[in-house]
Image (cartoon, helix red, strand yellow):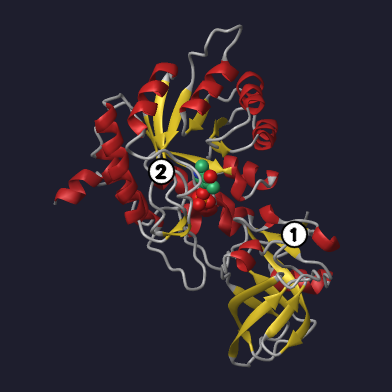
Amino acid sequence: MHQHHNALRVARALQPAAPVTLVRPEAALDAARFFVSAFPGKSFYAVKANPSPHLIELLWAGGIRHYDVASIAEVRLVRGLLPQACLAFMHPVKAEEAIAEAYHQHGVRIFSLDTHEELAKIVRACSTDGVPAEDLTLCVRLKVSSAHSKLSLASKFGIGVADAPALLLAARQAADALGICFHVGSQAMSPAAYADAMAFVRAAIVEAGVTVDVIDVGGGFPSRYPGMEPPSLETYFAVIERAYESLPISYSAELWCEPGRALSADYSSVLVRVEKRRGNELYINDGAYGSLFDAAHVEWRYPVKLVREDASEAEAMDFAFYGPTCDDMDHMKGPFALPGDIKAGDYVEIGQLGAYGSAMRTGFNGFGSGETVIVSDAPMASLIPAGGQPSVPQNVVPLGIAARS
Ligand SMILES: *Cc1c(COP(=O)(O)O)cnc(C)c1O
């Protein structure tokens, strides 16, 4: 991979006609170090947010040892890169063949489920000569509210609190370790999302009366985007730790999380070229079928920056983008604020695309991905403290004591 200092140097050196992915290894390392040092439990990287092998290895280098995989392709990918990593297969609806391959060939021992049918499937797939496995960690996925999140994950998966106790009891019989997991939805804008979800967890544990070994609070940790300024991640961690400590679970229980977005958003941005301007619409060379799926389909706004030799003096204006394909739906409403004198031939850097950006790229209409270049400047809008160090050193004042004083 080429290496340059920043987007301007890349534009100058390459004059690229296709979108260029700018990756920031330091930012990925910082994000990993931050979760490892500040989250009060184990952090599983949710690979679907960005399955780049480079990123997966950087997160390992930053201290991440656990990976949340959701398909057999992700299992094979991560196992191939990291023989020592702990993998958790956290998709609640899996092909039986995928479970069997994950268990017997790739050493996966952690599985999630939200029905009795899936439990039976896991037990069958992990048996050897009809003898059930005795080393499974089974996590029952609970349905919780997505009310605080920008992208809901409340309808597709999860068992309701009323039905959860029976499934927890059944899973307990088949499991060496029993967990409860949930997902509050992606880009949770308030830590209250986790406190609310933990109330459901408590109700399910009390009702079932089972011993629970793992509480997995899932993903949903936010990044920063225009118009979305969440509180610090430390605030989320403090709320989660407080709720966790008040649950009726054993002292040997473990707290897990599965950040996708928060570990990957800072990793990359994309350098695009303006091919045409029509009023306040810019026709750029990446779009809905490239790295801007969320910008088109859920009106996600990303930070943007004009990349020009001499900074523009023009006042900022709100723009919408059209992508390169012939499809009207290849439209990103924004608004994206850029200098009013922007014109065809200008380059624009679109930030925070490490999460659900390049991961969603298709080759539709012949517009695939261009080059990838390493840059060393800071990400455009990070929520991760510089250097990956938590702003308040952890473990200095136990949270329980701080809460009471
Ligand atoms: C998508 C997903 C994640 C990651 O979610 P983010 O909002 O990106 O943190 C974690 N766990 C599961 C089960 C998921 O499906």
> Looking at the picture, does residue 334 appear above or below residue 258?
below
In the depicted structure, whether residue 103 falls above or below residue 272 = above
Tell me what residue is drawn at x 60 percent, y 10 percent: 128
Q: Which residue is mark 2?
A: 143
Provide the secondary structure element on which disc 2 rests.
Answer: loop
Give left or right: position of 35 versus 10: left
Which residue appears at 32% of the width and 37% of the height? 162
Judge depth for marks 1 and 2 and give the one in front. 2
> Contact, CB < 8 Å: mark 1 with mark 2?
no
Q: Nearer the viewer, residue 309 or 109?
A: 109
Residue type for callout 1: Val
Identify the residue at horizontal 29%, vertical 28% (top origin): 208
Label 1 vs 2, first from the N-terminus: 2
Q: Is residue 33 above or below residue 252?
A: below
- x and y, in percent, of residue 288 in the image: 70, 65
Q: Where is residue 192, by image quadrant?
A: bottom left
Q: Secondary structure at mark 1?
A: strand
- Above or below, 322 against 155 in this view is below
Residue 36 visible? The answer is yes
Q: Which residue is mark 1?
A: 373
Q: Note whether residue 394 is visible.
A: no
Closest to the observer, 396 or 288? 288
Q: Which mark is residue 52?
A: none
Quadrant in which the N terminus appears: bottom right
In the image, 56: left or right of 41? right
CA gap, disc 1 and disc 2: 40 Å
Residue 124 in percent (x, y) is at 57, 17
Q: Which residue appears at 55% of the width and 44% of the height? A: 46
Assess mark 2: CB under 8 A from ligand 1?
Answer: no
Horizontal and vertical percent for residue 145? Answer: 38, 51
Q: Amino acid at mark 2?
A: Lys
